[in-house]
Amino acid sequence: MKIKKCLFPVAGYGTRFLPATKAIPKEMLPIVTKPLIQYGVEEAIKAGIKDMAFVTGRNKRAIEDHFDINYELEDKISDTDKRSLLEGTSQIIKECSFVYKRQIEMLGLGHAILVSQPLIGNEPFAVILPDDLCLGSDLGVIGQMKKLYDEYQCSIVAIEEVPREHAYRYGVIAGKEESKGIFRISDMVEKPSAEAAPSNLAIIGRYVLTPDIFSILEETPSGKNGELQITDALLAQAKKGRVIGYRFEGQRFDCGSIDGFMGATNFVYSEQH
Ligand code: G1P
């Protein structure tokens, strides 16, 4: 089965960016002139995916409005040279479908993914966490993983080497490198200490998941920080040899942190000027 849908879990608060995120979703913060969420959607499109699914929360309406027509504004700029500034976004709206579901309680990434089941159904799907902005590859990270899925037909997580003292920020994997950059995962731990980390290979915000993940999530108890963790559900698949870790091509910016956000801004700005 082909991957046709991409899930964006976007219910989180973004407290690290207060006061900027008091009234607008963190996913709407711009990297230069484009909101973070649009980069994520463009990466999915690059991978050939057209069906976008969002798990949203309260105060996230601006995301829905962004992927919709704004008649008044578009009418105002229709005869001016400003029109071109909206062309990319208008094209996305024309090309893709957008569906939304509210996550009523924020009980973790695993919970957000479980909540998305009615949007996804019984098929493999991609997940993009828009906080992790990935740039600098033609296919995009999700495009690279989609290709890999055709070959492996199992769940895939994108991984990156990080300093061990940063392990506490990530899910961390252990596995055997089967071919260059491709690991068969045997263990994974959510946000371990540097000492407890099984390696220095961290999961970043790109996943391909097979639909059995939903029934596994239903059975998975709360984990780290009392939250339902996707890492724990993936471990159940990994124990059956059904998860690949993929060291992706391109550059990742953690736009959930101020440093990463500034790094991405400088990168995009310097590419444009
Ligand atoms: C989530 C996952 C974690 C992963 C990270 C990537 O954590 O739980 O395993 O490494 O995304 O960005 P969060 O950043 O939501 O705390």
Image (cartoon, rainbow, N blue to C red):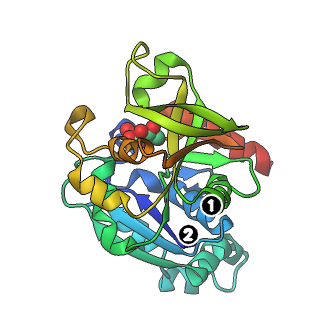
Left or right of 116, for residue 1: right
Crowd around label 1: few <14 · some 14–19 · many ≥20 (10 Å): many
* Residue pictured at 31% horizontal, 74% vertical: 118
**Residue 146: which numbered mark, if any?**
1
Of residues 202 and 176, the one drawn nearer to the viewer in this rendering: 176
* Residue pictured at 43% horizontal, 15% vertical: 194
Residue 22 visible, this orientation:
no
Q: Mark 2 and mark 1 in contact? Answer it, CB < 8 Å.
A: yes
Residue 8 visible, this orientation:
yes
| Residue 57 versus residue 67 in the image, above or below | above
User: What is the spatial separation of the Cα atoms under label 2 and label 1, in whole angstroms?
Assistant: 7 Å
Secondary element under disc 2, as helix, strand or loop, is loop
Secondary element under disc 1, as helix, strand or loop, is helix
* Residue pictured at 56% horizontal, 35% vertical: 260
Residue 43 at x, y percent in the picture: 62, 60
Quarter of the image for residue 239 reads: top left
Query: Label 1 is placed on what type of residue?
Result: Lys
Residue 2 at x, y percent in the picture: 58, 72
- Confirm if mark 1 falls within 8 A of ligand 1: no
Q: Which one is earlier in the sequence, the residue at label 2 or at label 1?
A: 2
Of residues 178 and 211, the one drawn nearer to the viewer in this rendering: 178
**Residue where numbered disc 2 is placed:** 3
Of residues 232 and 78, the one drawn nearer to the viewer in this rendering: 232
